[in-house]
Image (cartoon, rainbow, N blue to C red):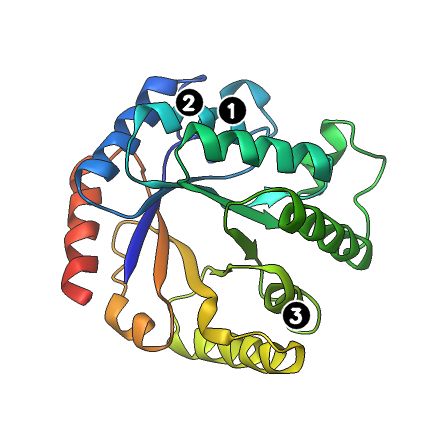
Amino acid sequence: MKLGVVVPQGWREDLDGRDFETMVGVARRVEELGLDSIWLYDHLQTRGGDPDRVLECWTSLAALARETSRVRLGQIVTCALYRNAGLLAQMAATLHAASTGRLVVGVGAGWDEREYLDFGYGETLPPIRERLAHLERTLQVLRDRQRSPILVGGGGERVLLRLVARYADACNFTDSFDPAFYRHKLDVLRRHCAEVGRDYDTIEKTASFTLAHGDDVDFATLAAAGIETFIVYIDPPTDLKRLETVARAAVDGA
């Protein structure tokens, strides 16, 4: 079982301005604790619509690649609508080099309509069918043009998990402490793998969720349901003592 941490970036109003040094401090502590990975959200403004308090995901990870030496670096997850697929592949190849191979390329279909409109990508967010088709084209380009492992975020059972089976090295499910939820999703993924001729065991199974004060997650039970890597956002993310407590709980659960 592996544990990754979402470091403060601003989307969740967890930074004062573009406070890069606070982000770096949390990332370094994650590495010092011997944890597996650090992650950033791919958002361009806060949930309230303020772009001035957010550090952009990919440029921030490029800088964090030089501030750390061991942890994996990922996005939870890159919106496929925001960047041309060829450009995204080139960005990934560059960050792969800058991080000496520690990059995970997390990608999803996108959902934040307000952000999509505010940044001028279009007049309306495309319907889910179009977004999934765009995601598949992006995955094809990424698979062809860059070397880092690809993580696909989302739990759609008919289309998205089939894309995982075809193209991804890892899947990500979100926002549940219920082992039955993960068992069901992984059973669906297993069926898609059988249909497309993919070895189910070659896909890393990850789960991401927020740990607020008072939340008590049973990592061992979720691991028994099939989750191999946990990606947690600790609220607030700058509480380094709580980070240490969560890290110990995960180790004990393993």
Callout 3, which amino acid?
Answer: Arg
Measured from the top left, where is residue 173 in percent x and y? Answer: 49, 62
Q: Please indicate whether residue 32 sits to the left or right of residue 112 in the image.
A: left
Q: Mark 3 or mark 2: which comes first in sequence? A: 2
Q: Quadrant of residue 220?
A: bottom left
Q: Residue at x 60, y 69 (%)?
A: 165
The disc at residue 197 is none
Count neighbours of disc 1 (C-alpha within 10 A) and say few if under 14, some if 14 to 19, many if 20 or more.
Answer: few
Callout 1, which amino acid?
Answer: Thr
Do callouts 2 and 1 mark residues in contact (Cβ within 8 Å)? yes
Q: The residue tagged with tag 1: helix, strand or loop?
A: helix
Residue 201 vs residue 29, the one in the foreground: 201
Q: Residue at x 79, y 44 (%)?
A: 125
Do callouts 1 and 3 mark residues in contact (Cβ within 8 Å)? no
Measured from the top left, where is residue 17 in percent x and y? Answer: 44, 17
The disc at residue 63 is 2
The disc at residue 59 is 1
The disc at residue 162 is 3
